[in-house]
Image (spheres, rainbow, N blue to C red):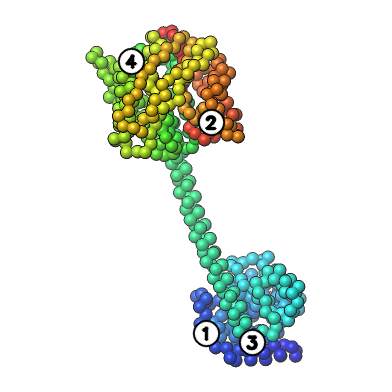
Amino acid sequence: MWPERVNVLIMIAGQRDAKPQANMYNAAPPRRVLVVDDSRLQRRILSASLVRWGYIVVEATTATEALAMCKVETPDMIISDWIMPGMTGPEFCRAFRIMGGSHYAYFVLLTSKSDTTDVAAGLDSGADDFLTKPVNGDELRARLLAGERILDMQYELSQTNRIMRKTLAELQRVYDSLDKDLQEARDLQQSLIRERHHDFGPAAVSLMLHSSGHVGGDLVGFFPINDNEVGLFGLDVSGHGISSALMTARLAGYLSAGTPEHNIVLERADNGKARARCLAKVVAELNNLVLTEMRTEHYFTLMLVTFDLTTGIAKLVQAGHPHPLVQRADGTVQQWGTGGFPVGLVADMSFETFELRLQPGDRLMILSDGITECPDPVGNMLGEAGLADMMHRFQGIKGKALLEAMVWDLSAFAGKEDFPDDVSGLVFEFNGTS
């Protein structure tokens, strides 16, 4: 009893000169402090000071009793004696940390031990601070204020985390909604290709479109001109995503329809039937249209073709799009084209029309650069040589099966099913018979 009496007298002496002051760190309501000590007198001394400083105080005589109280309501701060019957202060602290709670509690150990090993053991149990007996009132006050600063920061952090969780939940909701919209947009973009395969009799066309994301800027298509001619096109709008897809959809409106009133390539002849306009003028008109009316930073590459089913002659304009490939009936692969300038970059640009002729058994392919520029796992691109090798290996495959085989082979080359760029293609196979 003598050491305890000395502690009490010293503490009273320290408190006699202490002046009450407002606690700038106290939150509303006041902090709740749990005092744990088997000494009733020590608890009363500590409680009196804490109440005077504005704290709400609860008491426990043992660590077991204190743990039971913490399960009901977690205190803001705990002041616990080290030496107690049954469970010691460090053991209590360890059990309290394992139990967890609704919020963090600042834990202070009171001890007469001064050995650094003992102090380290106490802190290792989960305690935030310790005070050596006899306890000085000013020092206790300072330690509690330091603890309140920590609790304030912890509270702000928890509030920030709560806001972040709420924000992340809202972002997830927005993402899910956007993802659903993009899935629908992808379906709508795929619907721009109304037919994946069409047989004209003397020739057949097959189409393929794989966007690198939900939606992309590539498009391939065809349109009838008259009984003897068909139109073909492949285009690639710069960039990726929604804005590119919207521009692609608008361009589809200029090229996909089979009537002169809705297709920029077609016009009415004197006999009332549709015929193709000069392709070079059509592309020049599209170029000025993009620069003057569309108000977009996007441009696009284009391969525009008209094909005569009776003669096998194709007229083409290449505007920055990859060179068209012709695979002859004997398997030989040839590249054609003038290169040309992309559409929508420079005003009043002129374009050039060139011709090629297909013989029965030949096929014309219009492919996007997403194929030749597709990288393997170490970054090496497929290239034109790799594409030509692919065409030789798939010489005997026709139509949609050919395009599917190319996509499968490209996936094997890339080592994944998703490509870094949109992949599109058109194969036009000419058999020369009516």
Tag 3 near tag 1, CB within 8 Å: no
Question: Residue 398 has which mark?
Answer: none
Inspect the image, locate mark 3, and give the three-letter code of the amino acid beneath it. Answer: Ile
The correct choice, above or below, for 402 with respect to 379 in the image is: above
Foreground disc of the pair 4, 1 = 1
Count of numbered badges drawn on the protein: 4
Q: Earlier in the sequence, mark 2 or mark 3?
A: 3
Residue 96 falls in image quadrant: bottom right
Residue at 75% over, 90% down: 2
Pointer 4 residue: 226
Question: Residue 374 has which mark?
Answer: 2
Task: Indicate left or right for 140 with 426 as reference.
Answer: right
For label 1, count other residues whose C-alpha is less than 10 Å away and answer few (under 14), some (14-19) or many (20+). few
Q: Earlier in the sequence, mark 3 or mark 4?
A: 3
The N terminus is located in which quarter?
bottom right
Q: From this viewpoint, which residue is outermost toward the top?
A: 433
Secondary structure at badge 4 equals: loop
The correct choice, above or below, for 163 with respect to 241 in the image is: below
Q: Earlier in the sequence, mark 1 or mark 2?
A: 1
Secondary structure at badge 3 equals: helix
Q: Earlier in the sequence, mark 3 or mark 1?
A: 1
